[in-house]
Amino acid sequence: RPVTIPIKNRHVFITGGSSGIGLALAQQAASQGARVSLLARSLNKLQEAKESIRRSSGLDVAIFSADVRDHDAVQKAVNDAGPIDVLVVNQGVFVPQELEKQGLDEIKFMIDVNLMGSFNVIKAALPLMKERKDRLPASISLISSQAGQVGIYGYTAYSASKFGLRGLAEALQQEVIADNIHVSVVYPPDTDTPGFEKENEVRPELTKLLAGSSGSMKADEVAKKALDGIKSGSFTVPCNFEGHMLAIATAGLSPQRSFLMAFIEVASVGVLRLVGLFFQWNWYQTIENWHAKKNRT
Ligand SMILES: NC(=O)C1=CN([C@@H]2O[C@H](COP(=O)(O)OP(=O)(O)OC[C@H]3O[C@@H](n4cnc5c(N)ncnc54)[C@H](OP(=O)(O)O)[C@@H]3O)[C@@H](O)[C@H]2O)C=CC1
Ligand SMILES: CCCCCCCCCCCCCCCC(=O)[C@@H](N)CO
């Protein structure tokens, strides 16, 4: 059934809120009247984020410095921040590299921050969310990636960490629906953020080529799509046209509140599997051509 998650005068807690998509989300939520808290590691970046939100919207946000890999630090930050109505688990790290070349420490780093870190944040926030006084619908939202819907060259650990969020979200939604808590998973394409700039310096060419199939978006555009999806309680939140196709092609048994969308999914899943096969056919052609070119040089 459809639901609306109000954010005006409610507490929106965003991890990774000092940069990129998280910062854009914070700005938009604050300008829509939410009380915003940001959690990240670097206090400097948090203070800069706080200043930039104050400059752009004159609004004050709370900042909490903690590493999501440290459950106790996260628990302390969440307790200091107070009961949360809309939790946005956004933090993420991404170091693209072929598995053969990638160090196990880097693989563990991505799983620890993107997946285990998300468990730490949700575990810390859930008890107080269940006790919230206003009994209005609440939300736990995870920022995944289109690489969390389809594996992409160079993203073995990253995709694994983001695919894990989907299993977490589907199971969690069944566990918290009785508390009027609604789960959303947001799937952005490449997004113009400081993290992405850093990634582009080390990204394998094939990763760039294949991920490029879905184009790229600005952080503000992704944040708007994400916030709209979160407020409408959508379980799956695609961010662009390719993302809508991808969401239907990978719908599996994910929940669907909208009867219209359910109808569209049922009617189009067949042809979208065909489109997906064409994308894969094209991608493997690209991989083959890339190796052939490399062997010639
Ligand atoms: N940019 C892109 O192309 C895409 C990004 N995404 C996803 O969107 C999310 C945000 O990405 P983006 O905005 O690009 O990232 P940025 O690198 O720009 O920002 C990452 C944020 O997460 C925080 N963070 C990183 N590690 C930790 C940690 N261990 N504990 C607490 N906070 C942490 C950072 O602050 P600090 O370093 O100070 O801790 C920063 O605030 C990620 O989950 C990413 O996977 C999905 C698809 C595309
Ligand atoms: C059925 C039809 C299919 C439609 C087309 C599918 C195209 C998918 C391309 C995957 C793009 C992956 C982007 C990863 C962004 C990211 O997360 C990194 N920048 C690190 O954050």
Image: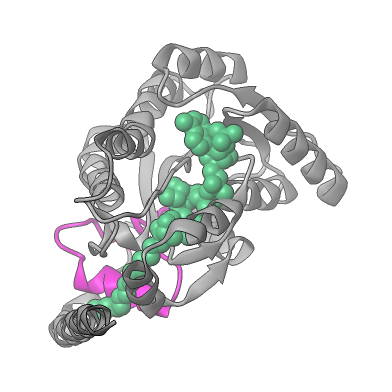
Q: Nearer the viewer, residue 34 or 97?
A: 97
Q: Quadrant of residue 289?
A: bottom left
282 relative to 105, above or below: below
* Lateral position of residue 10 relative to residue 121, left or right: right
Residue 230 x, y percent position in the rendering: 47, 52
Q: Quadrant of the C terminus?
A: bottom left
Residue 38 x, y percent position in the rendering: 62, 33
Q: What segment is highlighted magenta in the picture? A: 232-257
Asked if residue 67 is among those painted magenta in the image, a careful observer would answer no
Q: Residue at x 59, y 60 (%)?
A: 219
Q: Nearer the viewer, residue 28 or 261?
A: 28
Q: Quadrant of residue 254?
A: bottom left
Residue 56 x, y percent position in the rendering: 83, 51
244 relative to 115, above or below: below
Residue 260 shows up from this direction: no
Q: How is the image coloured?
A: one colour
Asked if residue 234 is among those painted magenta in the image, a careful observer would answer yes
Q: Which residue ends up furthest to the front in the rendered image? A: 297
